[in-house]
Image: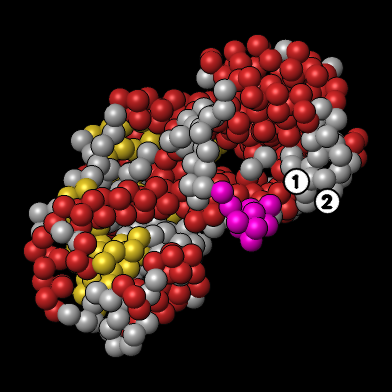
Amino acid sequence: MAKLNFAKKEKDLPIHSTHTWKVLIADDEHDVHTLTKTVLKDFKYDNKPLEFLSSYNTQETLQILKNDPHIALILLDVVMDSDDAGLYIAKVIREELNNDIIQIVLRTGQPGSAPETDVVVHYGINDYKEKTELTSKKLFTTIVTSLRNYKTLKSLKSTKQGLQTIIKASEDSENIFSPSLLIQGILTQIISILKLNHDSILVEHIDGLSIEKNENNYSIIDSTGHYSDIKNFTDVDKDIQKRIIYVLETKGCYFQENSFTGFLEIDKNASNIIYISNYERLSSLDRNLIEMFFKHFNSRLVNLQLTKEILSTQKVLIEALGQIVEKRYVDDPNHIKRVAKMSYLLAKKYGLSEEDANNLETVSPMHDVGKIGIPDDILLKPGKLNIKEFEIIKTHTTIGYGLLNKADKDTLNLAAQVAKEHHERWDGQGYPDGLKGEEISIFGRITAIIDVFHALYNKRCYKEAWEIEPIKEYFEEQVGKQFDPVLSRLFLDNLDEFLKIQETY
């Protein structure tokens, strides 16, 4: 009889399923609570209503925040049981609770007690309002903006966590491929990228010696949201069990109303079935992307398991997830594909072998993987970074290197090298190591050029897109300074081909 096992994700990975937006009103005036709830009683965002929580002093507020990490927004009074209660709470949220995604809207009836400029800079708040400003219309706008920001940050955090899990699955020190851990990361990625509601189950089926498809053949290896307390396959709703068994038999994807069940074949004796429900909207494009992912992944996964080759694992992940991951970045949906294709083109122009050019194409999109360790308020800041923030964001090069250099595999080592070196400069004025000239690997020098061009030519949260002439002037000025002179001349002389890639994707 097969043993039934249940394993939850690491503590930082569970994703909460919420069918409401939780809003905490922290104010010592009861009338403020009543008025806020009355004004917003019919409010909905993304077809989800608000769920209000109330607190009236510092202790109550912090207790609620500690007990419930899924609060999207706090409307926080400055003066409650002390003159700076709101400021203290905001500081605890960011520095002690390490909650970077909750939206903090500071409200005050005494604006002189907490100057807006000082508060915004030093306390990590997202908005500052005088209570007299919060008319029905302005309160509505504030809530919409806050929830939109929260949703974006939460989705980004989930994507980061899924990527961390995938990397962990790929860097096992004993070179043993870990399909369960890998698919946990894939599950998180799919949920985050498609902006679903995060109710899901990952079921593992082991044929073993028995061909009977009964409870003894199944084990829950991961679950989230509404299903997070399910420990045994027999505890799953009977209708869902039937869908899972049907997908196992047909080895395909199955959509029904607001649920999805997908089949992943690990090897000839083991399969994984992913069940996701309670998503809000799923367009035909979303369905096509999911079906494409599962079809492509299944066609390669058996071979990956047999060879236990991490190189192939990385390639199939980028192939299978690349087209889905790119839609995660709203402002630059084809970033991954363009960087990969441009890196390959410049590598070939320089004379690298087909193998080296292909390897660079595979790993170049991972040059910024270290940004998973950068706080969201810095990474998504819509403006110029200050000195302290810039020093923090520079660490993404060493963070990426640390994530990728732990496995004894050529592809990951190359990715680690690119992640670390893509901000080094030909003149030695770059970071993190101040390498100069050919001390920087050819892969790092190529990625540096493509990264800068792509960042300049496309819109970012902190800048508008540049026109092509200023970009050409910039590169002409940086020949032999920021960039390898041979590579930069090759790039400028063949700029039309790089622009064609930009237009194609």
Relative to residue 189, is residue 89 depicted above or below? Answer: below
Count of numbered circles in the view: 2
Residue 386 in the magenta stretch? The answer is yes
Q: Quadrant of residue 58?
A: bottom left
Mark 1 Cα-neighbour bin, 10 Å: few <14, some 14–19, many ≥20? many
| Marker disc for residue 433 | 2
Q: CA distance from mark 1 to mark 2?
A: 9 Å
Q: Provide residue 451's location: percent of width, then percent of height.
A: 66, 33
Query: In this rendering, would 41 be left or right of 192?
Result: left
Q: Amino acid at mark 2?
A: Asp
Callout 1: SS = helix
Mark 2 Cα-neighbour bin, 10 Å: few <14, some 14–19, many ≥20? some
Find the magenta span and give its range.
Answer: 384-394
Residue 416 in the magenta stretch? The answer is no
Query: In this rendering, would 470 be left or right of 297?
Result: right
| Marker disc for residue 420 | 1
Q: Residue at x 20, y 61 (%)?
A: 134
Q: Amino acid at mark 1?
A: Lys
